[in-house]
Image (cartoon, rainbow, N blue to C red):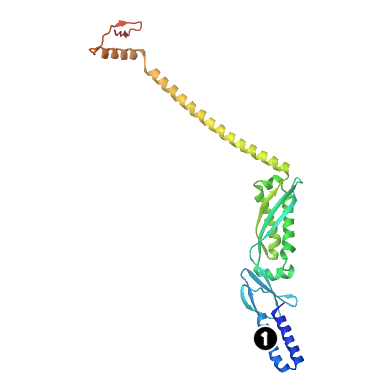
Amino acid sequence: MTPIIIALIVAAGISIYGSITGRTKQTIPISIAVLIIGLLFASVVTIPAGHVGVLTLFGKVDPEELPEGLHLINPLKSLHTMSIRTQEIFEHAEVPSKEGLSVGLEVSLLYHIEPTMASDIYRTLGENYDAVLIVPMLRAAIRNVTVYHEAKELYTSGREVIAGQIFAELDKALRARGIIVEAVLLRKIVLPEQVQQAINNKLAAEQEAERMKFVILREEQEAKRKRIEAQGIADFQNIVRQGIDERLLKWKALETVNELAKSPNTKFIILGDKSGLPIIVQP
């Protein structure tokens, strides 16, 4: 009940009381004062933060919205506040996939209304514009998009593509009506059990294949390292074999015998063997 209606009722009551008691002259000023106070209260309105005001007079909607703050209005007009903050609609839907499977989706839609179009929204859709327009459009968009995608796409990276397509369809339909779509989020996806198991098996196989690729690459690198190491050893042995001949070995043996002969504590007998090298015998 608006302040002006309350003031009228109170003023009428005071006037009736004055007529009954014969105090009309005394009650008339009081009634007028009550009416004036009621008019003042009805003329001053406050629009809270995050809202705009829409005024109506006898069913006609004013085209101009009232922004946040204190305003002085026609006391005969009615005020309707509408939120321009970000709002969320949560929707659970059972939708068909491209293969005809039934997939459960939990979708969140974030949106806000365009402040300069609040009057149009109120006039064409009413205060329950979300139930009248947004929810039905969201349900239709979800079905229109998922029917062109396989169930496995909803469970893998394809879900981002699907969310983007739902967003595009909603934005195209709602923006012209003054409703701005901010985001579409696929929060939960429930696939048929057989599809879920098949996807899990495929993912496990792909992970195992990637692991085996790593193992094979590591073994190939180890084999390559061993081949290089073996080749290095073979090259070294070949160089040594080519650089040392029999005469050098005999010469080194004679040098060793000569050093032993210089020692006063060494007793030896030199005999020749088949190779011509000396043999040292210590008693």
Q: Quadrant of residue 15?
A: bottom right
Residue 200: x %, y % from top left: 67, 41
Q: Nearer the viewer, residue 218 or 71?
A: 71
Q: Residue at x 39, y 18 (%)?
A: 242
Residue 190: x %, y % from top left: 70, 48
Q: Is residue 206 left or right of residue 233?
A: right
Q: Nearer the viewer, residue 107 or 17?
A: 17
Residue 106: x %, y % from top left: 69, 53
Q: Is residue 273 above or below residue 125?
A: above
Q: Nearer the viewer, residue 144 or 266?
A: 266
Residue 62: x %, y % from top left: 70, 75
Q: Quadrant of residue 136?
A: bottom right
Q: Is residue 247 above or below residue 172?
A: above
Q: Nearer the viewer, residue 75 or 59?
A: 75
Q: Residue at x 67, y 86 (%)?
A: 36
Which residue bears the numbered disc 1?
36
Q: In the rendered structure, which amino acid carries the disc numbered 1?
A: Ile
Q: Quadrant of the C terminus?
A: top left
Q: Is residue 90 left or right of residue 211?
A: right
Q: Quadrant of residue 83?
A: bottom right
| SS at circle 1 | helix
